[in-house]
Amino acid sequence: MYVLDCIKFSEEIEDFDVNIWENLINSDEVFTKQFSQSINTIDYSDNSTNKNDILKLSSNDINTSTFENSNKFIHIHRPMIILVSPSLNQRVRYANECEKIIRYVSIPDNNIMTFKIPDLRDNLITGDTLWMRITRTTIDHRKDHLVFYHPYPIWIKNEYAKIHNGSIFIPINDNDMETGTMKIYTLTMIRLKQYDLAKINTLPIYSSTQLVVLDQHSVEIKTPKRIRDEYKLQQSILNFQIVRVDQNNLAYPTDCFCQTESIHEIEGKVCSM
């Protein structure tokens, strides 16, 4: 038996609030009615907001830990593939908007984000569990090829989800393994307001081979729009990775990994109708 320890292994928003509208106008980040009608805002489950069911994720949560970090990286040599990916153009969503009615990432043809995953049950020992690590990062555009945890957070409505060192973790169950597919229904991409972006002075450096943040990049720019442009924050990547957690709560990242193409946040100006 293969032993894992070998290490080889809208229309405009319904009931739109005037205060939200004013905030959007003040931030100079709003949308035309024509564009909003073209974006999928259909929820796949109850979209009522219960804050106890929502985990907010950002680089500010980088020190939040659920698991113990292992210094081992597990090579499985079995692929994970995105079968149904999010749309590569996503409407900008702000926290105050989604605290009223959650807006999940749009998927082409109103579909559901779906992954082909390998069945690893025979590789596990008693007490092992498998988790999907979800991390939003910047795009690889720099000469030094550093990729950072994106300062704009992602949320998920999932009572079993955990936050660990800047990533969301959701459990992979036996049915996922048996069918060879996993679906993610309730992921939300959030944009920070300019005054929140201005508070950021470091960006954690992302690695798929480590769950712990080993280094931080200093952000010398203080103007929000310049930060957004310098780090191309209107674009982001969603990274997905299977992580094994043993009975001692030690978490091992694996090479079972995939990512989206660059996802663009789309914004526009309000037009008089």
Image (tube, grey):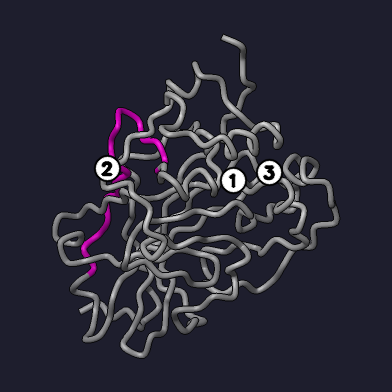
Name the residue carrying label 2: 44
- Residue that appears at 65% across and 74% down: 214
Name the residue rendered at 61%, 63% in the picture.
59
| Magenta stretch contains residue 69 | no
The front one of 83 and 94 is 94
* Disc with the residue nearer the chain's start (1 vs 2): 2
What is the crowding at mark 3: few (fewer than 14 residues within 10 Å), some, or many (at least 20)? few
Q: Is residue 75 above or below residue 87?
A: below
Determine the residue located farthest toward the bottom in the rendered image. 248
Amino acid type shown at disc 1: Arg
Q: Quadrant of residue 103?
A: top left
Sequence order check: which comes first, mark 3 or mark 1? 3
Q: Which residue carries the number 3 mark? A: 141
SS type, badge 1: loop
Asked whether, in this view, residue 160 is left or right of residue 167, the answer is left
- C-alpha gap between disc 3 and disc 1: 20 Å
Could you say which disc has been placed on residue 191 in the image?
1
